[in-house]
């Protein structure tokens, strides 16, 4: 499952070195910052890292998915 929609638009527009769209999956790296949760994603194809800042509400909605797919 692709998690690109959780990332900022600027990250979603970037591509793998071979021109494919990144396939972001969550890592288990999550960090609480004031009012937000920073969740680290990694592209399954090229290993590129990207961080999404979810507000607490959005995090709660997605928490189950993130912890299920996080590796
Ligand atoms: Zn990629």
Image: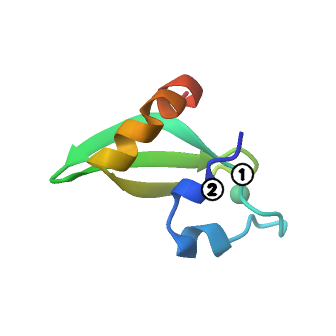
Can residue 49 be seen in this snapshot? no
Q: Where is 57 relative to 21, above or below? A: above
Quadrant in which residue 13 is drawn:
bottom right
Q: Name which of mark 1 and mark 2 comes first in the sequence.
A: 2
Residue 70's label in the rendered image is: none
The residue under the point 37% across, 43% down is 59
Callout 1 secondary element: loop
Q: Quadrant of the C terminus?
A: top right
How far apart are the two marked residues, 1 and 2, measured between alpha carbons? 7 Å
The residue at which mark 2 appears reads as: 4
Q: Which residue is mark 1?
A: 23
Mark 2, secondary structure of its residue: helix
User: Within 10 Å of the Cα at label 1, are there few (<14), some (14-19), or many (20+) other Cα atoms?
Assistant: many
Q: Is the residue under label 2 in contact with that under label 1 (CB below 8 Å)?
A: yes
Viewer-proximal residue among 48 and 58: 58
Label 1 beta carbon less than 8 Å to ligand 1: yes
């Amino acid at each position: 499952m692709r998690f690109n929609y959780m990332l900022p638009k600027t990250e979603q527009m970037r591509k793998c070195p071979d021109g494919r769209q990144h396939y972001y999956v969550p890592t288990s790296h999550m960090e609480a910052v004031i009012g937000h949760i920073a969740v680290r994603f990694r592209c399954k194809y090229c290993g590129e890292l990207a961080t999404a800042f979810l507000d607490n509400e959005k995090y709660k909605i997605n928490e189950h998915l993130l912890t299920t797919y996080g590796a």
